[in-house]
Image (cartoon, rainbow, N blue to C red):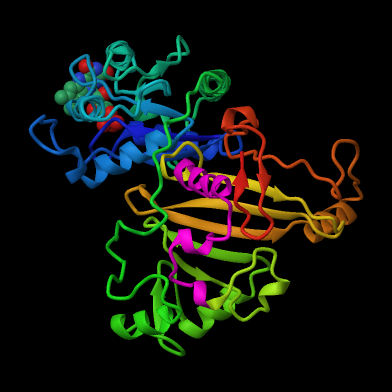
């Protein structure tokens, strides 16, 4: 389960941030919690474009995909901060990411009442028609005397307080589970598989379907290769090392960007006939419509459905199991959304993976065996994505195309 926590304060030192950070580490096995800051959000102004603000885009994208939101509100003059109110105004004017989203309120403040008045106001605001959140009833967690509440490591000192916080969070998890059954998936817009919407990184001088796309684009961009060093987020590798690293992955990896251009696969060295999802070097750079040209129209619709589902945030990944008569093969495809820094959709990372050797290893190592249900030789062919959604809620049972992994639902 993935939650985001909104720090309702724009101060560098914030007890509400400390509270969310404590929740994140203390209850990490119960849910994932990502903190969202509001310190750079401009004052709401309906004449201005919310998309101009990086932080607002991030807040919008993260809330849209989260299973639930925890808002930690300070109390300023018996109400919420102006900074938090501004965020809620932005997020209820042209866009409405809180709509039908489960939200839990908590807060920390200096005095005994521990944000009780701010929480009442916040609850009312979250229920306003433009916001329309599903706010968890009751379960008021109020952390008074915030200055004395934490130790030097940021942990809440009082055990009883931690226990009560856990109870409130457990109730929120249950609430999110219930509310998720009411969730209506967002509409999937038609996908342009012909790459007609160039993005900042698209090289428009070479036709995507050109079989020499890699060489031609490398020349135009001056792309580095071989022993040249590349600085990554947390490491420095040569291009040769990056290639070795990716080639050694025990699965087939592909990358298509948000213009639906198939940019890369890691098995160009491999005989295509030995691959679970057959790719050939001339496909690098191709339009997705070309990569899947052999598919019947219905299957092409399924490619669009997978991309659209990831693009609109209904799911962060889609998984399929490709039927295979060979009992040594459990051919799984995982289509994972990738995101830009502001949380917007950046394309698909596809992993094609024979899960059977790993499964056998796990069973042997732990002395377990599979019982009942579908046997590996005749697996169920259905999508069960991140939400745990059943076939019907993600659009019906899925069958798959053995070559492309495109699923039909
Ligand atoms: C302008 C202002 C008004 C405040 N009003 C209240 C208040 O009404 N009730 C309260 O409990 N604390 C009040 N405080 C103190 C806050 O509880 C305290 O600053 C707290 O640390 C704010 O949360 P933060 O640390 O997450 O920013 C106020 C603080 C400021 C700066």
Task: Say above or below: 262 vs 406.
Answer: below
> The N terminus is located in which quarter?
top right
For residue 231, say whether it is visible.
yes
Q: Where residue 188 sits: x, y (%)? A: 43, 37
Quarter holding residue 380? top right
Q: Residue at x 26, y 43 (%)?
A: 55
Front-most of residues 113 and 106: 106
Q: In this rendering, is residue 38 above or below 336? A: above
Magenta segment, which residues? 282-309
Residue 207, image quadrant: bottom left
Magenta highlight on residue 68 = no
Q: Is residue 349 left or right of residue 275?
A: left
Task: State the residue at coordinates (41%, 27%).
Answer: 70
Looking at the image, which is closer to me, 59 or 150? 59
**Residue 302 part of the magenta-drawn span:** yes
Task: Locate the C terminus by quadrant.
Answer: top right
Whereabouts is ligand 1, in terms of quadrant? Answer: top left
Residue 306 relative to residue 58: left or right? right
């Amino acid at each position: 389960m993935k939650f985001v926590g909104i720090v309702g304060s724009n101060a560098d030192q914030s007890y509400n941030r400390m509270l969310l950070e404590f929740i994140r580490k203390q209850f990490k096995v119960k849910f994932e919690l990502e903190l969202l800051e509001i310190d750079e959000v401009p004052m709401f102004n309906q004449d201005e474009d919310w998309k101009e603000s990086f932080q607002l885009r991030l807040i919008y994208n993260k809330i849209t995909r989260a299973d639930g939101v925890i808002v930690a509100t300070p109390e300023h003059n018996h109400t919420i901060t102006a900074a938090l109110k501004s965020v809620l105004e932005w997020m209820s004017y042209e866009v409405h990411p809180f709509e039908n989203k489960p939200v839990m309120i908590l807060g920390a403040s200096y005095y005994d009442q521990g944000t009780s008045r701010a929480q009442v106001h916040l609850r009312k605001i979250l229920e306003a028609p433009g916001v329309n959140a599903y706010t968890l009833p009751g379960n008021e967690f109020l952390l008074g005397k915030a200055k004395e509440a934490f130790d030097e490591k940021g942990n809440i000192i009082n055990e009883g307080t931690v226990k009560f916080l856990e109870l409130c969070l457990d109730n929120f998890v249950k609430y999110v589970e219930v509310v998720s059954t009411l969730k209506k998936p967002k509409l999937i817009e038609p996908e342009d598989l012909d790459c007609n919407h160039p993005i900042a990184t698209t090289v428009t001088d070479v036709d995507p379907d050109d079989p020499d796309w890699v060489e031609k684009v490398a020349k135009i961009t001056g792309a580095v290769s071989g022993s040249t060093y590349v600085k990554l987020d947390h490491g420095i590798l040569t291009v040769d090392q990056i290639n070795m690293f990716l080639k050694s992955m025990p699965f087939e990896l592909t990358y298509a960007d948000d213009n639906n251009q198939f940019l890369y696969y890691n098995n160009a060295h491999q005989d295509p006939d030995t691959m679970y999802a057959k790719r050939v070097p001339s496909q690098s750079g191709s339009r997705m419509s070309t990569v899947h040209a052999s598919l019947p129209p219905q299957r092409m619709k399924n490619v669009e459905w997978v991309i659209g589902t990831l693009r609109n945030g209904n799911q962060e990944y889609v998984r399929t199991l490709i039927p295979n008569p060979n009992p040594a093969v459990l051919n799984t495809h995982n289509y994972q959304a990738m995101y830009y820094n502001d949380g917007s959709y950046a394309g698909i990372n596809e992993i094609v993976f024979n899960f059977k050797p790993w499964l056998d290893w796990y069973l042997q190592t732990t002395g377990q065996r599979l019982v009942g249900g579908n046997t590996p030789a005749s697996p169920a062919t259905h999508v069960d994505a991140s939400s745990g959604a059943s076939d019907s809620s993600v659009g019906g049972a899925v069958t798959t195309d053995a070559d492309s992994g495109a699923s039909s639902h």
